[in-house]
Image: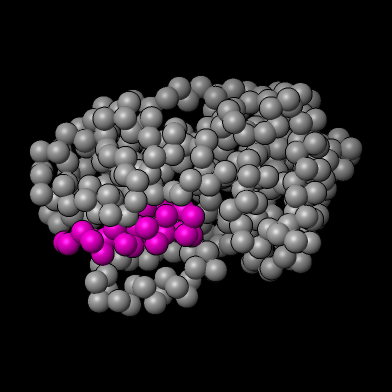
Amino acid sequence: MPAPGIDVSLVTSGHDVADARLHRLVAALTDSGLTVEVIGLGDPATAPASASDVRTRPRRGPRGRLADAVTGPWRARGRVVVVLDPDAVPSAWLRRLTGRRLVVDVHEDYSALLDDRSWAHGVAGGIARAGTSLATSLARRADLTVVADKHVPPGDARRRLVLRNLPYGDYLPAPAEPDPEPRALHVGDLRRTRGLFDMVEALAAAPGWTLDLVGPVAPADADDLDRRLAAADVAGRIRLHGRRPPHEAWALARGAWVGLSLLQDTPAFRDAVPTKVYEYLACGLAVVATPLPRQAELVAQTGAGVVVANPAAAAAALTAYSDGPALLAAHRTAARAWTGDDTSAYTAFVDAVRTLAAR
């Protein structure tokens, strides 16, 4: 039987409890009066403060993740079980047969994301793609399927809700005046395809600038990054902060001049709007972004930044800001004028979960 007092269980086998989307979902649910428990990875101190209970495990490699994917939904005590990872969907579907209601939250197009992972080839890649296909098939028949954007599958789910990664809650600081010295910011996972080394090269070619990088570094890129950051042209100018809960990560936006979103053109990113771009705008930062169609369109519509094709162009954009205060001020004013898109999907999400919990 569901535990008394627990309406919703958020279960993840792959995400740290500091994950920003997880924080936004919990905030929306608890703001409406629902009680939420979180079962995931990492330090429980970085979990959403409004959660009624938090249970975590350390990351344990592929076998450990598989074990968490199987057991996590069965540890859930809520009336509604929300799973955030494809590998946990089959076990959660079986748990649904015991009377729980199942919500599958699909963060991104997982099939396209595999094309962005160096390990997803051969036998391992085949297994991963088969698992993703099974998870997608089951997700379309869940009590509610939540997707992070309109292009994210499954498009033919029985009950589908698009819940984009728009800011929600109080984790973002109010727009503030820029620091005396030019400083750029990036918040999110750090890997080559997400523009990690492009950002480093841009800083190397933009004298006077510093950069705060907030997020976990992909293990495959860690050694190369350490070697590059030791070079004289960037030494001491780039600060690595690691993974941080949203309110700590975004505290670094206070005083920053620019937010960077230099994602490469991969199948996983091509049709997406990175969450960080919405958040940069909400913080009043100018945005320097690569020409992925939708993020470039957002930057152009708001007039709050520059679209750049490569690190050299990004460096030129940064230099233009430090050389031209009027340009920076204009783009930051445009960012402050951005009022955000319609966030009514959060209300729809909460209403749907509340209805499922009442059953």
Left or right side of 289 for 85: right
Residue 146 seen in this snapshot:
yes
What sort of colour scheme is used for the picture?
one colour
The reply to whether residue 3 is visible in this rendering is no
- In the picture as drawn, the residue positioned furthest to the right comes out as 97
Residue 172 coordinates in the image, percent (x, y): 36, 42
Nearer the observer, 308 or 61: 308
Q: Is residue 159 above or below residue 233?
A: above
Residue 70 forms part of the magenta stretch: no
Q: Is residue 248 above or below residue 225?
A: above
Image point (61%, 57%), residue name: 117
Q: In the image, 38: left or right of 158? A: left
Taking the image as shown, residue 317 lies to the left or right of residue 165, namely left
Task: Indicate yes or no whether the magenta region holds residue 207.
Answer: yes
Q: Residue at 48%, 71% (x, y): give it.
A: 222
Which sits in the foreground, 163 or 43?
163
Q: Where residue 159 sits: x, y (%)?
A: 72, 23
Please name whichever residue, 27 or 299, is drawn nearer the observer in this view of the structure.
Answer: 299
* Residue that appears at 52% across and 54% down: 18
Q: Nearer the viewer, residue 270 or 10?
A: 270
Report the number of numbered marks: 0
Image quarter of residue 346: top right
Where residue 211 sits in the image (x, y, percent)? 29, 59
Where's the C terminus, which quadrant? top right
Rendered residue at 32%/40% (across/down):
307
Compared to residue 197, the image places residue 167 above or below, namely above
**Residue 152 appears at what percent x and percent y?**
62, 34
Region of the chain picked out in magenta, as a range: 186-214
| Quadrant (top left/top right/bottom left/bottom right) for the N terminus | top right
